[in-house]
Amino acid sequence: DAGITQSPRYKITETGRQVTLMCHQTWSHSYMFWYRQDLGHGLRLIYYSAAADITDKGEVPDGYVVSRSKTENFPLTLESATRSQTSVYFCASSEMGGGSYNEQFFGPGTRLTVL
Amino acid sequence: GQNIDQPTEMTATEGAIVQINCTYQTSGFNGLFWYQQHAGEAPTFLSYNVLDGLEEKGRFSSFLSRSKGYSYLLLKELQMKDSASYLCAGPTDSWGKLQFGAGTQVVVTP
């Protein structure tokens, strides 16, 4: 499918388990981002990537790991899930960074529940 | 990060006009984005202001004053489908990172 996709769309897991959320985009955008969205906090940046093999932390990176071996994929791993990581996770991509016009395109989101 | 403030909720009737304000610290943002997010869906881009002034796009307009750290989104001729959350966001650095406000829930009533 064209665009940006996320899988799974819904996930229930238990505390302490490792979980990987997948993100795939077909536009060959250089920049990719992971956000979490919680009531009252809006979207908060977890990690971002400017290109394959270039990643950096955002505002709330603790407990998460990312990798980007290919331009089109940007998986997010929760190494040992905690209840506080229950949230809706959005992946996004943009063609440019550089402080210029850099509209981000969002995936449909993954709703994660940690029991 | 930057403090971005926007009202939590606004209610307006169909056909009316609503203005959603967004304020932020004056340093650090190169322009300002507005996104729309319907319940249970992903945010979608509405507008981007890089210069001061008003940008009009159909029923939606966005205004920016960089010196005052102030932006607004104006929704005219409201329709029921405009019921959504509206997020303002500032690009914080040259990597394209965005700092989002908590969002304003707009409720359009018949």
Image: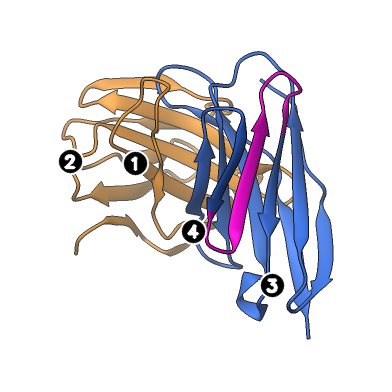
Q: CA distance from mark 1 to mark 2?
A: 9 Å
Magenta range is B57-70
Report the residue at 68% width, 39% height from top.
Answer: B101
| Both labels 2 and 4 in a single chain | no
Q: Could you tell me how far apart the alpha carbons at marks 4 and 3 are, in whole angstroms?
A: 21 Å
- On the rendered image, what quadrant is the C terminus of chain B found in? bottom right
Tell me the subunit letter for badge 3: B
Q: Is residue B63 magenta?
A: yes
Image coordinates for residue A79, horizontal then vertical, percent: 44, 35
Instruction: Indicate whether B8 appears above or below A57.
Output: below
Q: Do callouts 3 and 2 point to residues on the same chain? A: no
The residue beneath circle 4 is B42
Q: Judge whether residue B61 can be spotted in this image.
A: yes
Residue placed furthest toward the bottom: B110
Circle 2 residue: A28
Left or right of residue B1: residue B108? right
Q: Secondary structure at mark 2?
A: loop
Q: Is residue B29 above or below residue B84?
A: above
- What residue does disc 1 label? A93
* Residue type (three-letter) at the residue carrying disc 3: Leu
Do tag 4 and tag 1 residues touch (Cβ < 8 Å)? no
